[in-house]
Amino acid sequence: MADKPVISIVTPSFNRAASLKRAVASVLAQTLRNFELIVVDDASTDRSADVVRQFQDPRIRLHRFDVRRGANPARNQGIVMARANVVTFLDSDDEFLPHRLERTMDIMRQEPRSDVLLSSFHTWKRGRFIASVNPDVRLGAVELEHLLMAHAVVIAGSGITVRRELLTRCGGFTHHLRRMQDRELLLNIAGCQALSGREGARLLAEPDWVKYQSVDSISAPAHGFVEALGNLMDCHPDLMSQYGTLVRYHVARSILSQLIRGRHKAASLIYGENLRVPAFRFSRRELVQAYVRGRWTRMGLRRAVWTSARRAYDLSAAATQPATTLRLPDRFPIATRRAA
């Protein structure tokens, strides 16, 4: 542990001894060797701590909470403990592909303007891999905010890499959020970057990790999405006024996806969630109107992201080619963030 690591990996865990072993093993199998893995155990009652200790690797640091505090406080504890200048995250039920860290650090060194990397990934679902891929492109800070609000780029916790100074300056993860915490972190970062005149994020096209859908995953159920969206907007009330149409679109889309599947009761429950969120309480008419406008906006944004890439997506070469910086066309109204 004498040498300073070039990258710190933060893994929060609660009662996931089985999957945690796979996650840790994937870090130890990395082609880049100069790292530290910080596992923050959120007062697990299973053998999670023993699983970590069994690896007997000095690059692994284990921190245990005496009482359960939640995944976000665990992530923030890992950020505080990080010794490297670059921090990335790995959920305890996911795994890195062997080149994940080496490729990440290569880009960080080659592109000093890139403070945030967002990796593409594979999702293991129903016995097969599903690719979740972004184009290879840089995003301005305002563009990142707009795309996050439109859900027009693929994001997930284990795909986020940030320079530690920026994480510290922007305040890390919001403690009380149980869902959409990754999106909220990136919205904070987009705001910080806009105020400091820095770029928003660099999207990476080549998948470099695998997401597994756990039975106890908070983000998986359809119910709770609207409530989580409301909690996210409570953290950013200014964005609610700027991106109201897109917010209503997401609520409408969540309801419509259940109706298409014939799940009328589920759709009714989601509409009920909408009525219980004080900042929402959208009428059916508002949702229908917003769905039409929001769908057009989201599709246009996704098209703008992909066409802004320097050339067609190529898995074998995307990581080695310089990326272009996306600036959205004038037809997309970009909200101007007020200086703090």
Image: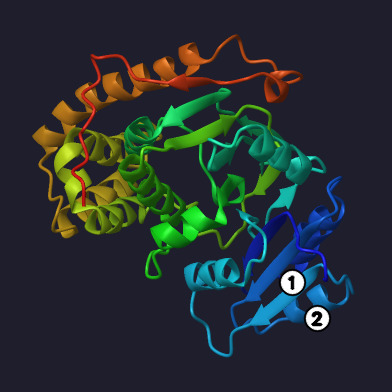
Q: Residues within 10 Å of mark 2 (few under 14, many from 20)?
A: few
- In the visual, does 217 lie left or right of 333? right
- What's the distance in space between the residues labelled 2 and 1, CA to CA? 8 Å
**Residue closest to the eye, 277 or 234:** 234
Q: Position of residue 93 (x, y in %)?
A: 67, 58
- In the visual, does 136 lie left or right of 83? left
Q: Position of residue 53 (x, y in %)?
A: 83, 78
Tag 2 and tag 1, C-beta contact below 8 Å:
yes
Name above or below for residue 253 compared with residue 7.
above
Q: Position of residue 42 (x, y in %)?
A: 59, 78
Kind of residue indicated by mark 2? Asp
Which disc, if any, is residue 17?
A: 1
Quadrant of residue 54 within the rendered picture: bottom right
Q: Residues within 10 Å of mark 1 (few under 14, many from 20)?
A: many
Task: Give me the residue at 17% from left, 59% from top.
Answer: 276
Q: Let me know if residue 92 appears in the view.
A: no
- In the visual, does 324 lie left or right of 214? left
Which disc, if any, is residue 50?
A: 2
Kind of residue indicated by mark 1? Ala
Q: Let me know if residue 79 appears in the view.
A: yes
Quadrant of residue 300 within the rendered picture: top left
Q: Position of residue 164 (x, y in %)?
A: 55, 57
Task: Give me the residue at 75% from left, 59% from top.
Answer: 5
Name the secondary structure under disc 2. helix
Name the secondary structure under disc 1. helix
Name above or below for residue 190 compared with residue 60.
above
Counting residues from the start of the chain, the first of labels 2 and 1 encountered is 1
**Residue closest to the eye, 275 or 23:** 23
